[in-house]
Amino acid sequence: MLYYKTIIKSNDSEWVTLLHGAGGSSSIWFKQMRYYRKHFNILLVDLRGHGKSANKEWKKNDSFEHLAKEVVDVLDYLKIDKTHIIGMSLGTIVGQTMAESYPERISTLVLGGAIINVNLRTKFLLAIGRTIMNFVPYMLLYKLFAYIIMPRKAHEESRLRFVNEAKKVSQKQFIKWVKLTKLVNPYLAHLQVATKDIPTLFIMGEEDYLFMQPVERLVKENGNFSLEIIEQAGHVCNIDQPEAFNQISSKFIMKHVKSVTM
């Protein structure tokens, strides 16, 4: 089973499950804990190959569906019937996959730094990564990707946090995650349709130039999706501007919880 940690406010409180991005771990949510624990029960999970789930083995045809099932297995073990999902970066794909396969278990989706489409520039970078990742030390590639995705001085804390966490990921695990991106565009297009009945909020940093435009287009086309843009924040907006992220995400969740007051 995946490594997990719970922080329980009360038996009657809503659960939120936090899903980190590739190269990170549950520790990326450190700026959310003090705020969220006032309002919710919290489930923190280290996804396969990350943090304290670093030794989780892969099988040949493992996919995002398998990664989502591993998180649901934790929910089952803890007897959590329903949860709100808060994901970051590639963690948003795992969260949306859970919503597609287990819609009865998901109350809302909050997708930070969401990846819903990979543009030509990003496809090119990923193709290069897949070509050379067996020959180049993965940390060199990860640092390059981190600088491309989070290039500004204001993103330095987020960038360093992910680079330091990525050092705990083995080259083998890194290669498996990169290979998952190969068919991600058609899969993501399918997810948008499959999860449109679940209340969904996208939270994007205004400086998230690689992934912002597809989200803006998607929200315009789907009335059940909404978008909040955080100023002076990049891809990992929960670290760049934690107060704004905490308030926006909590307000959205509470709007869909009538039995609990802030």
Image: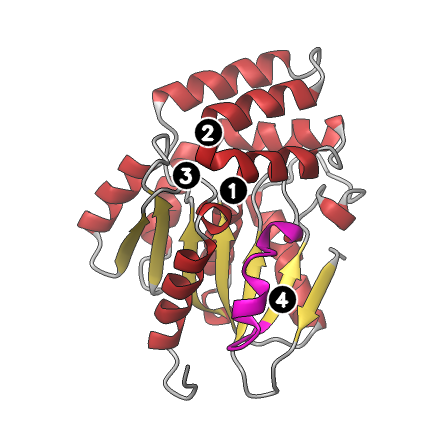
Q: Which residue is mark 1?
A: 90
Q: What residue sits right under mark 3 in the picture?
A: 234
Relative to 238, 56 lies left or right: right
Compared to residue 163, the image places residue 241 above or below, namely: below
Q: Answer above or below: position of 49 versus 101.
A: above
Magenta residues? 27-41
- Amino acid type indicated by mark 4: Leu
Q: Position of residue 90 (x, y in %)?
A: 51, 42
Distance between the alpha carbons at the discs numbered 3 and 1: 15 Å
* Marks 4 & 1, CB-CB < 8 Å contact: no
First along the sequence among labels 4 and 2: 4
* Residue 62 inside the magenta-drawn segment: no
The amino acid type, in three-letter code, at marker 1 is: Leu
Residue 258: image location, x then y, percent: 36, 85
**Foreground tag (3 vs 4):** 3
Q: Which residue is mark 4?
A: 43
Lower position in the chain sequence, tag 3 or tag 1:
1
Label 4 and label 1: CA atoms lie apart by 18 Å
Contact, CB < 8 Å: mark 4 with mark 2?
A: no
- Cα separation between marks 2 and 1: 13 Å
Quick check: 253 left or right of 56? left
Between the residue at mark 3 and the residue at mark 2, the CA separation in whole angstroms equals: 8 Å
Residue placed at 76% from the left, 57% from the top? Answer: 1
From the viewer's perspective, is the residue at label 3 or at label 1 nearer? Answer: 3
